[in-house]
């Protein structure tokens, strides 16, 4: 502590995927960085285990591609979809990229520790274990809206309360963020739970692929996380879990598991640790005061069905570094705020594409018992099974390789129209026509609210989107911290 600077260039609250990656990148740009993480031991989570190819490219651009080495990570080349004893395999469209570009799956904690190690090896990065209690203003008091954020007050692991000051404070403390309500106006939904199991020494039907079972009542996922282990995630819809989980997995889920994996699944139910995590969809309107930003799951989450969270976080890290890099110094909070004013809208093409696809696919893949919805569900499976542009287009969106919301909406309604066409072939009937109308209405009810929550202008016309509410206009002559 004695050798620490009086004012850091950047304080990062949280050292997960976003925090560790940004600490490394900011140090490479010559910034003095303090990272405060509540728990520096290796994380142990059942999500954050699949990095899409677009996320790998973002990791590579940050200079952290080696973080997937030495942790027994597995390359992932695409997906295998299962429904009613039928299977369709789709590949990531990585033609034109270098040979190393693919998805990666791994133990989440190993990956995070590798990135933390890369960050602390930089001479200008200091990483401390502590709990951030509040943001502080330039006078050292509690920060309030309309003031400049000048740092944080935190409690160290040994119980000592300290204050750290910085020109820029970036909050990236994850899904359980303690700062979220201070820096944004969040809207949170909990559509389901993931129940996680480990299958040991199992060969998947399609090696190096994620496996998605369109089961009843909701999807089941299988994917490798090491050379000897396969993760199974069972989605349990609703806000309450079944009373007896083992019985539920045996009676309701096991019959939906493909025959080739059912015995291994039942063995894992009996002998593997059953872990549960609540799934979250988070839309937040950021406030963007001078001296502070939010990043990662602290202010934006989507259903983890498609494994897009880390791709969004790493893409955001690259974007933020690009916006800060032209500034020779971060001492002037007003100049920094101007440079990052468009961050929350410029991130939208990537984040909105992945968020919308994840949340929409989850709703489509869930079984509801409604006939029109089941037609949409079947149409989605059959559309992807066609291959060619019918699979490469949607998978390029899911993988983060083609972050274009307009292409997403096009493919979504192409699936719906494909379903309508099947209902009217070979001879239109009144029943088929009515079912087609219901299918289109159902598709609209799924995707339009999701786009609305993301922000129509921010998704399709970022240049026209309003900037986040902040203190830029309310503190026109705020002196920088160094002058204090």
Image (spheres, rainbow, N blue to C red):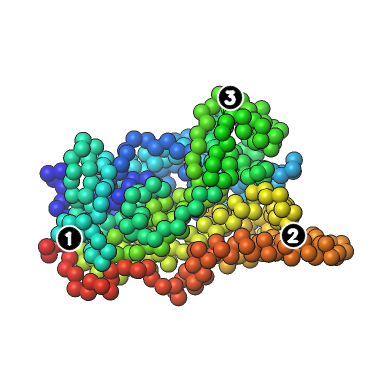
Residue 323 in the figure: left or right of residue 266 = left
Q: Quadrant of the C terminus?
A: bottom left
Query: Circle 3: is it few (<14), some (14-19), or many (20+) Cα within 10 Å?
Result: few
The circle on residue 291 is: none
Kindly identify which residue carries mark 2: 419
User: Which residue in the structure is indicated by mark 1?
Assistant: 138
- Label 2 CA crowd tier, 10 Å (few <14, some 14–19, many 20+): many
Residue 47 as seen in the image, left or right of residue 247: left
Tag 3 secondary structure: helix
- Callout 1: SS: loop
Q: Nearer the viewer, residue 281 or 64?
A: 281
Number of marks in picture: 3
Residue 281 at what x, y percent from top left? 49, 53
The mark nearer the N terminus, 1 or 2, is 1
Asked if residue 347 can be seen in this view, the reply is yes
Mark 3–mark 2 Cα distance, whole angstroms, equals: 40 Å
Above or below residue 154? Residue 243 is above
Report the Cα–Cα distance between label 1 and label 3: 56 Å
Kindly check if marks 3 and 2 are in contact, taking CB atoms under 8 A apart as contact. no
Q: Which residue is mark 3?
A: 270
């Amino acid at each position: 502590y004695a050798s620490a600077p009086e004012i850091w260039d950047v304080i990062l609250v949280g050292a997960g995927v976003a925090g560790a990656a940004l600490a490394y990148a900011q140090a490479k740009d010559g910034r003095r960085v303090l990272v405060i993480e509540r728990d520096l031991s290796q994380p142990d989570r059942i999500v954050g285990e699949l990095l899409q190819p677009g996320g790998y490219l973002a990791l590579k651009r940050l200079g952290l591609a080696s973080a997937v080495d030495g942790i027994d990570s597995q390359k992932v080349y695409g997906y295998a979809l299962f429904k009613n004893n039928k299977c369709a395999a789709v590949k990531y469209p990585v033609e034109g990229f270098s040979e190393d570009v693919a998805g990666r799956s791994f133990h989440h904690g190993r990956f995070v520790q590798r990135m933390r190690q890369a960050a602390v090896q930089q001479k200008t990065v200091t990483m401390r274990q502590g709990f951030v209690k509040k943001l502080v203003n330039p006078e050292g008091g509690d920060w309030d809206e309309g003031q400049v954020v000048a740092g944080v007050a935190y409690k160290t692991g040994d119980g000592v309360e300290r204050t750290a000051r910085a020109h820029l404070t970036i909050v990236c403390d994850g899904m359980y963020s303690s700062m979220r309500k201070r820096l944004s106006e969040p809207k949170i939904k909990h559509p389901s739970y993931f129940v996680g199991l480990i299958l040991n020494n199992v060969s998947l039907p399609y090696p190096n692929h994620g496996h998605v079972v369109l089961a009843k009542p909701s999807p089941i996922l299988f994917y490798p996380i090491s050379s000897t282990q396969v993760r199974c995630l069972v989605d349990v819809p609703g806000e309450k879990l079944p009373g007896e989980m083992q019985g539920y997995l045996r009676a309701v889920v096991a019959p939906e598991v493909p025959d080739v994996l059912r015995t291994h699944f039942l063995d894992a139910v009996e002998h593997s640790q059953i872990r549960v995590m609540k799934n979250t969809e988070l839309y937040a309107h950021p406030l963007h005061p001078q001296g502070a930003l939010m990043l990662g799951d602290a202010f934006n989450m989507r259903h983890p069905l498609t494994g897009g969270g880390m791709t969004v976080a790493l893409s955001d890290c690259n974007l933020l570094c690009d916006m800060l890099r032209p500034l020779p110094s971060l001492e002037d909070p007003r100049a920094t705020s101007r440079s990052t004013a468009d961050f929350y809208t410029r991130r939208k093409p990537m984040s909105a594409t992945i968020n919308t696809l994840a949340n929409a696919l989850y709703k489509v893949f869930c079984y509801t018992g409604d006939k029109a919805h089941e037609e949409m569900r079947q149409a989605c499976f059959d559309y992807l099974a066609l291959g060619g542009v019918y699979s490469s287009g949607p998978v390029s969106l899911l993988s983060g390789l083609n972050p274009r919301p307009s292409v997403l909406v096009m493919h979504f309604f192409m699936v719906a129209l494909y379903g309508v066409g099947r209902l009217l072939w070979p001879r239109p009937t009144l029943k088929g026509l009515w079912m087609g109308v219901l299918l289109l209405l159902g598709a609209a009810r799924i995707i339009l609210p999701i786009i609305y929550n993301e922000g129509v202008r921010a998704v399709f016309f970022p240049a026209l989107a309003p900037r986040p509410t902040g203190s830029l206009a309310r503190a026109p002559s705020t002196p920088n911290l160094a002058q204090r």
